[in-house]
Amino acid sequence: MPITLDGDPLKCAIKREMKVSELLSTLGISREVVIVKSNGKIITEFDTISPRDKIELIRVSTGG
């Protein structure tokens, strides 16, 4: 499963289906600070991902 964080590849061996929340927990990333895309579509922490999916994590930034 290719996983990127802000376009940079992450080294992570995901070999089974899992919930997005489990992936984020494994990576030590809070769900409040990223948007998760699977195969180009935004998904939620409750969605299931599989090893064949392309996962993109995009950090959310706020400010004024």
Image (spheres, helix red, strand yellow):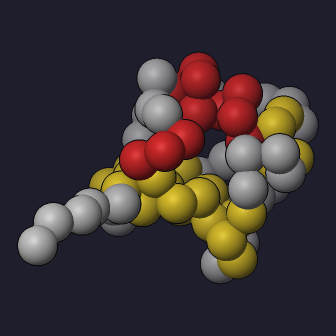
What residue is at 73 percent from the left and 46 percent from the top? 45
Out of 46 and 11, give the one closest to the viewer: 46
Position of the C terminus, as image quadrant, is: bottom left
The image quarter containing residue 19 is: top right
**Of the pair 4 and 46, the residue shown nearer to us:** 46
The reply to whether residue 21 is visible in this rendering is yes
Residue lying at the far left in this picture: please name it.
64
Choose top left, top right, bottom left or bottom right for residue 55. Answer: bottom right
Residue 4 seen anywhere in this rendered image of the structure: no
State whether residue 30 is above or below residue 39. above
Q: Measured along the vertical axis of the image, is residue 43 above or below residue 32?
A: below
Q: Nearer the viewer, residue 51 or 27?
A: 27
Q: Residue at x 73, y 56 (%)?
A: 44
Tell how many labels: 0
The residue lying furthest to the front in this view is: 64
Residue 22 location (% of width, % of height): 72, 27
Q: In the rendered image of this protein, does residue 12 appear above or below residue 49?
A: above
State the image coordinates of residue 15 (x, y, percent, origin top left): 78, 30
Question: Residue 24's x, y, as percent?
Answer: 58, 33
Q: Is residue 24 shown left or right of residue 18?
A: left
In the image, is 34 to the left or to the right of 18?
left
